[in-house]
Image (cartoon, rainbow, N blue to C red):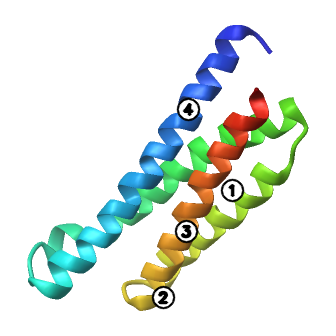
Amino acid sequence: MSDTMLALRARLDRIGVLLSGLCLIHCVAGIFLVGMLGLGGTALLNPDIHRWGLAFALVIGAATIGIGALRHGRFLPLAVGGTGLGLMAGAVAVGHGNAEVVLTVCGVILVAGAHLLNIRGAH
């Protein structure tokens, strides 16, 4: 793989970690603002936000973690990331509630961890 492609994949892995963190913040802020203060329910709980977030996570995760696993031969990031993406998809499927929060938080933590494992595997 060319140096340009390696740099792009590493950058996308970092973006994946950032997006996972933003998703986690969105989830926690949503719980606090909607549950505790009764604010922002329409915007924060909009199912389209979750569907688009999952779509971005699938594209970036599959591309970077999959290509990284093929390149460095370590499949742990792929297994961890696939599990995380599966949990995130399950969260979108179950709808709003406690199960969604638990699945989303566990999923984004696993996906972020997979991106970090992928970055470490590339070195």
Query: Measuring 57% from the left and 67% from the top, which residue is drawn there?
Result: 107
Q: Of the residues shown, which amino acid type is indicated by label 3? A: Met
The answer to whether the residue labelled 2 contacts the one labelled 4, judged by CB atoms less than 8 Å apart, is no
Give how far across and how far down residue 10 sits, in percent: 62, 27
Q: Residues within 10 Å of mark 4 (few under 14, many from 20)?
A: some
Is label 3 in a helix, a strand or a loop?
A: helix
Indicate which label's residue lies in the foreground, 1 or 3.
1
Mark 1 or mark 3: name the one nearer the start of the chain: 1
Quarter the C terminus occupies: top right
Horizontal arrangement in the rendering, residue 16 relative to residue 51 (left or right):
right
Instruction: Give the Cα separation between the discs numbered 3 and 2.
Output: 11 Å
3D distance between C-alphas at marks 4 and 3? 19 Å
Disc 4 element: helix
Residue 81 tag number: 1
Residue type, mark 2 in image: Ala
Name the residue at 52% across, 35% down: 14
Residue 16 place in picture, x, y as percent: 52, 43
Compare marks 3 and 2 and give the one earlier in the sequence. 3
Residue to which mark 2 is pinned: 99
Provide the residue designation for mark 3.
88
| Residue at the spot 41% in from the left edge and 90% down from the top edge | 98
- Three-letter amino acid code at the position of disc 4: Leu
Q: Can residue 45 be seen here?
A: no
- Contact? badges 3 and 2 (CB < 8 Å): no
Disc nearer the start of the sequence (2/1): 1
Q: Residues within 10 Å of mark 3 (few under 14, many from 20)?
A: many
What's the distance in space between the residues labelled 2 and 4, CA to CA? 29 Å
Q: Is residue 14 above or below residue 7?
A: below
Q: Residue at x 57, y 52 (%)?
A: 112
